Image: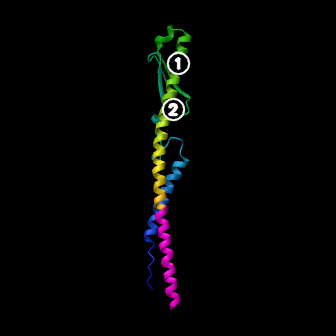
Amino acid sequence: MASGIDPSGLSGSLEEAMRLLSQASGAVTAQPGESDGPAPDAEQTVGRGTGGAGLVEAEVDAFGALRTLVIDPSLSRAGTSMIAEYVLEAVQAAQADERARRADLTAAAQVDSTALTQQLERVSEEAFRGFQQMIGDLDAATRRMNRR
């Protein structure tokens, strides 16, 4: 008995939906600023700044915590208050750099999640049409069987 049911198209839609959902769940569980691609490397989440015309260099992590601090030895004669001022300047610049990097990564992730949402909606609509077709085909097959 031949029927008009062809689940192959529906199967493809469901596979696409599962792939997109897998991407989406990876993005949902990702840390802020990550896209649906590979996780940002350490360089993307580190902020760098300088103070005292480059005599002090600071590096902060993704949470703004100080990772490294390099003070040019020539500053040893400048006095502690001047060194403290340059250190503060470098750390604040590094934190601002980290915030800017995070904003860029977050903006990129937002674009990706918007595109992903659109893809999921398209796949959902295709799957719904496939289910409607399958139900119609099952209904027609049931009517044919009842006539026999």
The residue indicated by pointer 1 is 87
Question: Looking at the image, which residue is at 46% across and 45% down?
Answer: 111
Question: Looking at the image, which residue is at 44% across and 18% down?
Answer: 54
Which residue in the rendered view is the most extreme toward the bottom?
148
Dominant SS of magenta comes to helix
Task: Pinpoint residue 51: horizontal percent, then vertical percent.
Answer: 48, 18
Nearest to N terminus: mark 1 or mark 2? 1
At label 2, counting other C-alpha atoms closer than 10 Å, the crowd grade (few under 14, some 14-19, many 20 or more) is some
The residue indicated by pointer 2 is 99
Task: Pinpoint residue 24: horizontal percent, then vertical percent.
Answer: 51, 52
Task: Pinpoint residue 145: horizontal percent, then vertical percent.
Answer: 51, 87
Measure how far apart labels 1 and 2 are at the Cα level: 18 Å
| Amino acid residing under circle 1 | Val
Image height of 27 relative to 98, above or below? below
Indicate whether residue 133 is drawn in magenta: yes
Which secondary structure, mark 2?
helix
Image height of 123 relative to 4, above or below? above
Indicate whether residue 3 is drawn in magenta: no
Quadrant that contains the N terminus: bottom left
What's drawn in magenta, residue-wise?
124-148
Which secondary structure, mark 1?
helix
Task: Pinpoint residue 50: horizontal percent, then vertical percent.
Answer: 47, 21
Residue 6 — which label? none
